Amino acid sequence: MYNFVEMQDKEVLQILTGEEKREAEGLELIPSENYVSQAVREANGSIFTNKYSEGYPGKRYYGGQTYTDQIEILAIERAKTLFSCGYANVQPLSGANANIATYFALLLPGDTVLGMDLSHGGHLTHGAPVTYITKFFNFVRYKMKNPDTGEIDYEEMRKVALEVKPKILLAGFSAYSRELEYDKFVSIAREVGAYAVIDIAHIAGLIAGGVAKNPFDYGFDIMTSTTHKTLRGPRGGLILVRESEELAKKIDRAVFPGLQGGPHMHTIAAKAIAFGEAMQPSFKVYTAQILKNAKAMETVLHDRKVRMLGGGTSNHLILADVHGSLGVGGREAEEILDSVGITLNKNMIANDTRPPLDPSGIRFGTPAITTRGFTEKESAQVANLLLDGIAHRGDKIKLDSIRQEIRKMCIQFPIPDSFV
Ligand code: DSN
């Protein structure tokens, strides 16, 4: 794969092969990561990286757009089919850009967004005070009513919405393990005259695979997303509009020229391939297995009495309170598990009293191990190894034996090249 890098730049080659080995010999449990197909990697590293194409198909600011137009139209059409909607913008460079472009499309400075609190599962771009978008817009946050069930306080959300009159009622999350009640979001949004927007970055693949509800069926106006995570495409963003041409025009203008310059056509080519993969019947099977595997991990944590935020999972991820249950901070747990070949991330939990760089929780999930072919059996085994690793921290012999187990699983389930 790296023939030319090898001839030209040994320093970079060494780093690339290091990462190849790390991914091959360890298990990826970060729920926002996945392994893409070789076809996605080829398109992502393709000739389109050479090309500037500001504008949209048929309306560009540079010449030479025959094939950029074709690939962008193909990606758009596939995205529309996949998510059953009228419009798609495939140009956002990331999920953060997709969210920020959506705010600029729908809001005026000072307007209010009601979104989920970061420590209760929301995302930085949903209005965390450290982000620059909070200088432009007023973000008000809602929370879970009960972190042990994951129940969101919709009554309180409605009360706050009636008070602060948001222009956007924002659903979606990056660390929340339960399903949202979409009808309640949409009904509150309609009552206060807000746009109903949802960030589906984490669950886009589950929606595309038909194993999670499609928020458009409940009347959401706009969905923003990344194209990696459960959707298993290249790193990038996506904005979908249910049916309003007027909204779609606003979104297009906000992405370009509002926020971005030239789109990354190589990434758009890779998005088209990933969307094509997600349209195959095998993707349904894959996404159904993601959920089964997460349930198998949930059972292990439940049996071993580890507190899970939301009381468990209904999607691809689990947020575990390792500090409360096992007396280990999230940072230490992440480091121990890294050393045995399990990659996951430390994470704040609702009402965390510990700092963000050493919070109480860890977050992990099943999209990548499911791509490797793991079923419930192996997923339960990984959950046990993960908890054993934390329990036996400091015991070098035990940690070495866990490392060997993980390596064996990686050899038995290599990262596949293709899914179709
Ligand atoms: N960084 C992503 C995640 O891990 O969930 C969200 O952007």
Image (cartoon, helix red, strand yellow):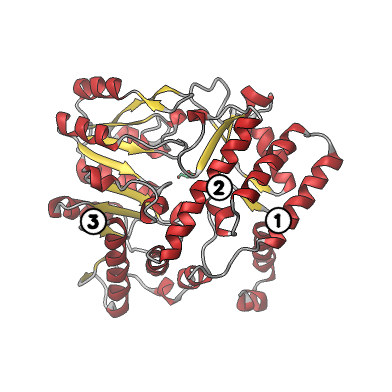
Amino acid at circle 3:
Cys
Residue at mark 1: 409
From the viewer's perspective, tell me whether residue 359 is left or right of residue 110.
right
Q: Residue at x 62, y 22 (%)?
A: 324
At 34% from the left edge and 63% from the top edge, which residue is drawn? 263
User: Residue 85, labelled with which disc?
Assistant: 3
Residue ID at (32%, 37%): 171
Task: Name the element at disc 3.
Answer: loop
Q: CA distance from mark 1 to mark 3?
A: 40 Å
Residue 242: x %, y % from top left: 21, 51
Residues under numbered marks 3 and 2 in contact, where contact means CB atoms less than 8 Å apart = no
Residue 279 as seen in the image, left or right of residue 285: left
Q: Image quadrant of residue 198?
A: top left
Q: Earlier in the sequence, mark 3 or mark 2?
A: 3
Q: Is residue 32 visible?
A: no
Relative height, residue 377 to residue 66 (above, below): above
Labels in figure, total = 3
* Image quadrant assignment for residue 71: bottom left
Q: Is residue 360 left or right of residue 135?
A: right
Q: For label 3, count other residues whose C-alpha is less than 10 Å away and answer few (under 14), some (14-19) or many (20+).
A: many
In the image, 235 versus 223, the foreground residue is 223
x then y, percent, for residue 93: 38, 56
Q: Quadrant of residue 197?
A: top left
Mark pair 3, 2: CA separation: 29 Å
Q: Amino acid at mark 1?
A: Met
Residue on which disc 2 sits = 293
Lower position in the chain sequence, tag 1 or tag 3:
3
